[in-house]
């Protein structure tokens, strides 16, 4: 049977290498297509890599603990002649150095420079206090978190590892960081000020990253915000009428967010120059509509997973995508790919009771829409027999855009078109 090269895959934009944490199959083991073959760590996530073929693992070329470049051969799989032929006909990924990485979004972790002479593993330290609590192997992601949190090598070795062979995983170190302030630690996280009138709280790793990205976005783009109030009474009545049916039929909660995203997608089709990014003096017009949705995490931090090809999904598909990404974000299960390639972002500020806001752009995107709280308000209603006053459900849409490339006319017409789609929502809409 022929041998086929297994290539180190691309794991998100700007990721050029990864550390082999563990091989989940050994030489001679059979493997099915889409079955997890190995676990890889990058400076963003630890993730399992599935096999692209059915067959037998014939050779492992990169052992555990070593770094592999994206596009390099890391194993060989013995497979059928038919699958081997199909695999060879597929184009191999371009070498990492030939890829041009797009600017990072606000939710991506900064990538530390990897020096070739720096080993991927750190030998465990033994002291009189006893045996180390992990095997001394630390992935780039774990080392990055340790550096951001000010965790020394001596402290690192005291954290219990629950991974294979007592390996310290991302989950272990994040759990340690979250509980760090509850027990004595070498580095105090909250310390009193000299006057005793306030506390000094050290930012965690993600908060530092968010702060840097927010400042970078404000320095890069000329932010302008336009506001529109939309009457969403039909949407409120329809959603209240359909939510139990939706849960019983599709096993997923029906919220307002996917309905709003559907309207944004339609407006982006009408105004494609809002679905762009900026690279220096070049405007890059995107063909795909990938909607980022800001998710607030339990610790108060923010992350923006992306619904890929949102224009190809109906309301049911959008609802499932929104719920899936939100759930995985809150359970720390997102991958680097989930956070990449967004072309426009939506933030639901209404979930916190806010009526409007001025959101900051996710670079290099040029638009972000904040959804305000839905409130009952008295409003003038036009009827064939004259105007009357009634109670309507209304919300503000706050559209921030990059005034370098989006003029006020386009920015204003776009958010007005989103409001129009929301107001025209039919009570007879089927799901």
Image (tube, helix red, strand yellow):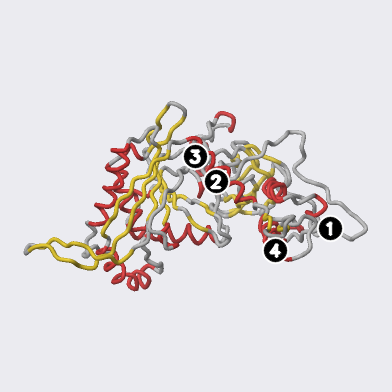
- Badge 3 or badge 2: first in the primary sequence: 2
Q: Position of residue 118 (x, y in %)?
A: 76, 37
Q: Is residue 413 above or below residue 382?
A: above
Camera-nearest label, 3 or 2 = 3
- Badge 4 or badge 2: first in the primary sequence: 2
Q: Is residue 418 above or below residue 218?
A: below
Circle 4: element type: helix
Residue under circle 1? 132
Indicate left or right for 360 with 50 as reference.
left
In terms of image quadrants, where is residue 384? bottom left
Label 3 to label 2: alpha-carbon separation? 54 Å
* Crowd class of label 2 (few under 14; some 14 to 19; many from 20; radius 10 Å): some
Q: Nearer the viewer, residue 103 or 95?
A: 103
Residue in the picture at 81% in, 60% down: 133
Circle 1: element type: loop
Give the number of the disc on residue 218.
3
Residue under circle 4? 179
Camera-nearest label, 1 or 4 = 4
Residue in the picture at 51% in, 58% down: 296
């Amino acid at each position: 049977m022929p041998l086929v090269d297994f290539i180190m895959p691309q794991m998100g934009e700007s990721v050029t290498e990864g550390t082999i944490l563990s091989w989940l199959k050994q030489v001679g083991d059979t493997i099915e297509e889409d079955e997890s073959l190995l676990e890889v760590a990058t400076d963003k996530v630890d993730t399992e890599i599935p096999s692209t073929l059915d067959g037998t693992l014939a050779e492992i070329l990169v052992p555990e603990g070593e770094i592999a470049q994206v596009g390099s051969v890391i194993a060989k799989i013995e497979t059928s002649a038919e699958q081997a032929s199909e695999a060879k006909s597929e184009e191999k990924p371009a070498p990492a150095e030939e890829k041009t990485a797009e600017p990072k979004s606000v939710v991506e972790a900064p990538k530390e420079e990897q020096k070739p002479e720096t080993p991927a593993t750190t030998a465990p330290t033994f002291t009189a206090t006893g045996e180390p609590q992990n095997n001394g192997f630390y992935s780039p992601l774990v080392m990055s978190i340790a550096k951001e949190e000010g965790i020394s090598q001596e402290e690192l070795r005291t954290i219990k590892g629950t991974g294979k062979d007592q390996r310290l995983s991302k989950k272990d170190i994040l759990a340690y960081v979250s509980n760090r302030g509850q027990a004595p630690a070498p580095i105090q996280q909250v310390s009193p000020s000299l006057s005793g009138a306030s506390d000094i709280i050290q930012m965690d790793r993600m908060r530092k990253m968010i702060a840097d990205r927010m400042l970078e976005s404000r320095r890069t783009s000329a932010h302008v915000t336009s506001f529109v109030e939309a009457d969403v009474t039909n949407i409120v009545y329809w959603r209240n009428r359909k939510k139990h049916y939706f849960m019983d039929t599709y096993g997923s909660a029906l919220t307002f967010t996917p309905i709003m995203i559907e309207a944004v997608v339609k407006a982006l089709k009408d105004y494609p120059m809002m679905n762009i990014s900026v690279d220096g003096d070049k405007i890059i017009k995107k063909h795909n509509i990938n909607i980022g949705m800001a998710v607030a995490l339990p610790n108060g931090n923010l992350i923006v997973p992306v619904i890929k090809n949102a224009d190809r999904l109906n309301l049911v598909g959008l609802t499932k995508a929104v719920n899936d990404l939100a759930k995985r974000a809150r359970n720390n299960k997102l991958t680097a790919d989930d956070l990449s390639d967004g072309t426009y972002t939506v933030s639901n500020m209404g979930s916190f009771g806010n009526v409007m806001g001025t959101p900051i752009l996710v670079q290099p995107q040029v638009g972000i829409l904040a959804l305000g709280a839905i409130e009952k308000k008295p409003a003038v209603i036009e009827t064939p027999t004259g105007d009357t006053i009634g109670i309507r459900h209304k919300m503000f849409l706050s559209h921030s855009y990059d005034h370098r490339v989006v003029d006020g006319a386009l920015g204003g017409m776009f958010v007005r078109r989103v409001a129009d789609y929301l107001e025209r929502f039919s009570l007879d809409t089927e799901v």
